[in-house]
Image: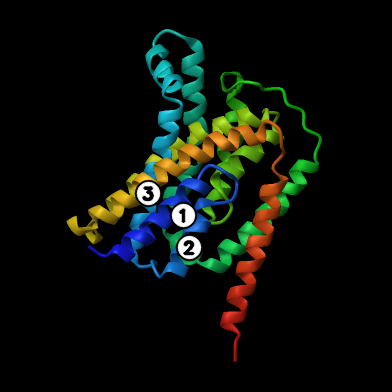
């Protein structure tokens, strides 16, 4: 058993769990971390996809009562059916665009420089949105209209560009259309469930040939650490945004993105 490889898997699992549900781009951070750790071959890319399931499992666990209640009440309650329909409508745009553009995005955009540029651009966008006058009209995920869900779903398509951040696109678009901060975050969490299951399932099925039984320890370590770290971060994130705005995440994105751009510019242009 390669202990160094397991340690790298542990680091990437933590990176995934910490960044998946806050507006800083987990995919972007995984690409950068994998590049620095020397884990950027085909097997490593599948590993990064797989550990997202650990992170999403944390949301299912944290909101298990809400989710089980919706499933149980769909045959009887309009509110449960409306919630499920909103999630489906919000999920649909990225599913369609993802299938169409998946190959091109993987081929041309999964690199540190494009990720860093997207981090900076997204950070500026968050600052601009925070400067807008907030008009929170929706104080529960059960109050969303179909039109609002569709708007968030369209915004989620932006996150197909690595570095944009799925949670960032959905949360900030939620604020723009009138969702309370906590509601915007929670709807983003719920929307992540079908989105990430579909994306990871597709990628794992497509790349199953590169995996073997020897990968089980590495994948297990990454999965568990992603789950545990996501549990901690989601709880802390909800507590944080109940009292603060998202500007600190924007500043982090800009500083981190510029640092990465500087690093790769210096490396590539060094004489």
Task: Give the position of the C terminus as an image quadrant.
Answer: bottom right
Residue 74, above or below 200: above
Callout 2 secondary element: helix
Examine the rendering and report whether any part of residue 199 can be seen: no
Residue 248 placement, left or right of 235: right
Task: Give the position of the N terminus as an image quadrant.
Answer: bottom left
Dot 2: few (<14), some (14–19), or many (≥20) neighbours within 10 Å? some
Residue 29, above or below 128: below
Image marks 1 and 2: residues in contact by CB distance under 8 Å: no
Cα separation, mark 1 vs mark 2, equals 24 Å
Q: Tag 3 or tag 2, which sits nearer the N-term?
A: 2
Residue 244 placement, left or right of 192: right
Query: Which label sits on residue 200?
Result: none
Residue 99 placement, left or right of 248: left
Examine the rendering and report whether any part of residue 47 can be seen: yes
In the displayed orientation, state which residue is furthest to the top.
76
Dot 3: few (<14), some (14–19), or many (≥20) neighbours within 10 Å? many
Q: Tag 2 or tag 1, which sits nearer the N-term?
A: 2
Out of 63 and 93, give the one closest to the viewer.
63
Q: Tag 1 or tag 3, which sits nearer the N-term?
A: 3
Can you tell which quarter of the image residue 255 is in? bottom right
Callout 3 secondary element: helix
Callout 1 secondary element: helix
Cα separation, mark 3 vs mark 1, equals 22 Å
Residue at (62% x, 80% y) in the render: 266
| Residue annotated with mark 2 | 33
Image marks 3 and 1: residues in contact by CB distance under 8 Å: no
| Residue annotated with mark 1 | 101
Query: Which label sits on residue 51?
Result: 3
């Amino acid at each position: 058993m390669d202990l160094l490889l397991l340690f790298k898997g542990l680091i990437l699992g933590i990176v995934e769990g910490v960044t998946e549900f806050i507006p800083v781009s987990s995919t972007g951070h995984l690409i950068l971390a994998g590049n620095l750790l020397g884990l950027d071959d085909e097997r490593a890319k599948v590993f990064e996809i797989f550990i997202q399931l650990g992170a999403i499992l944390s949301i299912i666990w944290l909101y298990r009562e809400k989710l089980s209640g919706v499933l149980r009440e769909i045959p009887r309650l309009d509110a449960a059916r409306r919630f499920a329909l909103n999630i489906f409508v919000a999920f649909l745009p990225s599913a369609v665009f993802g299938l169409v553009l998946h190959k091109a995005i993987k081929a041309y955009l999964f690199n540190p420089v494009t990720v860093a540029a997207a981090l900076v651009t997204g950070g500026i966008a968050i600052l601009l949105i925070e400067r807008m006058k907030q008009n929170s009209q929706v104080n529960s995920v059960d109050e969303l209209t179909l039109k609002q869900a569709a708007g968030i779903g369209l915004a989620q398509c932006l996150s197909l560009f690595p570095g944009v951040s799925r949670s960032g696109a959905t949360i900030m678009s939620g604020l723009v259309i009138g969702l309370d901060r906590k509601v915007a975050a929670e709807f983003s969490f719920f929307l992540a469930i079908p989105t990430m299951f579909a994306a990871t399932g597709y990628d794992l099925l497509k790349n199953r040939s590169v995996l073997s039984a020897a990968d089980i320890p590495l994948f297990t370590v990454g999965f568990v650490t992603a789950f545990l770290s996501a549990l901690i971060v989601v709880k802390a994130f909800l507590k944080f945004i109940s009292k603060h705005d998202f500007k600190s995440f924007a500043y982090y994105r800009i500083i981190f993105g510029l640092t990465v751009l500087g690093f790769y510019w210096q490396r590539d242009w060094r004489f």
